[in-house]
Amino acid sequence: MRYQKQILFREIGKEGQANLKKKTVAILGCGALGSVAAELLARAGIGKLILIDRDIVELDNLHRQSLYTEKDVGEVKVVALESHLKEINSEVKVEIYAIDLDVQNVNLLKSDVILDCTDNFYTRFVVNDYCKKVNLPWVFSSAVGASGFVYPVLQDSPCFRCVFEIPTTSLGTCDTEGVISPIIHSVASLQVSLAFQLLLKKKVEVELIYLNMWSFNLNKIKVTKKKDCPTCKEEFEFLSEKKKKEVVKMCGRELFQIRTNLKLNEIKEGKRGKKSLFLKDITLFEDGRVLIHAKSEGEAKKKLERYFG
């Protein structure tokens, strides 16, 4: 039996395994943390995975994004990930969206549990507002260098905004601070373990977990609600259009995302993928987004004009 060893674990058992097969997990961000979490859930026999990511696979991803291979470089991440997951467990339903999550499409996250594996705070605050509004549990995760955080956000618990302030300056990322692969797999494993507990209606301790895989420290931090937290007061400002940006620099790299009205089916040049079109150093997505390799926002806009007018 495929899941025999997992069923033998008494906290899951036959009933728990049957329940996992009925559940849907949405994974937002399919890079390092998201691809590992997706693999663990697929191997565990989850019923359905919703995969959302706005990026493509690059060569410098491969040292930590362990499910991707050299053949995937240049491919849309959700397309490559879906292919690998189907080879691992063909029974799992996989739904993919090569999009930039924002207020207009956040309802695509509707599931039993949401795993946040993104690399930016704006998206996390959108998720936080959405989940509070519709009463969905989600699990935040992040990893930079050798350390990472995991935090489950439940309806009555301190929300993400109770714990983290809106950044006013640029924060360190994998592309500016580096990252080692052990922290990725460790953080993703903690996140999936919390997902199991939430899906199986087990009691979950709402604590901010800090883990360092170089010094081997693990701390669990108690958090409390903020009295003036806008999200807990149901003031969902991140569900408005005001916070939306048309040009976004992608996580420390010389890569920019620009929203356009371009139609994928109207462009005749380039190499076509399942959800994208490739033109030299430009990738065009179905939703009109364009990823452009450039050293500055101005250069990115010039390249866009040069190729598409």
Image: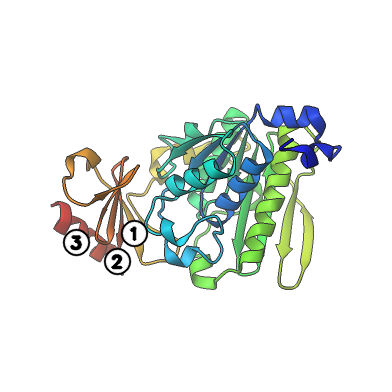
Q: Label 2 to label 3, Cα distance in Å? A: 10 Å
First-in-chain label (1 vs 3): 1
- Residue 256 is marked as 1
Name the amino acid type tagged 1. Phe
Q: Are marks 1 and 3 in contact (CB under 8 Å)?
A: no
- Which quadrant is home to the N terminus? top right
10 Å crowding of disc 1: few (<14), some (14-19), many (20+): many
Image coordinates for residue 178, horizontal then vertical, percent? 55, 71
Image coordinates for residue 154, horizontal then vertical, percent? 69, 37
What residue appears at the point 61 percent right and 57 percent down from the top-left corner?
A: 142
Q: Label 1 to label 3, Cα distance in Å? A: 12 Å
Question: Is 33 on the left-hand or right-hand side of 248?
Answer: right
What residue appears at the point 71 percent right and 72 percent down from the top-left corner?
A: 214
Determine which residue is flagged by label 2. Answer: 294
Determine which residue is flagged by label 3. Answer: 302
Pick out the residue farthest to the right. Answer: 10
User: Residue 294 appears in which quarter of the rendering?
Assistant: bottom left
Name the amino acid type tagged 3. Lys
Name the amino acid type tagged 2. Ala
Q: Are marks 2 and 3 in contact (CB under 8 Å)?
A: no
**SS at circle 1:** strand
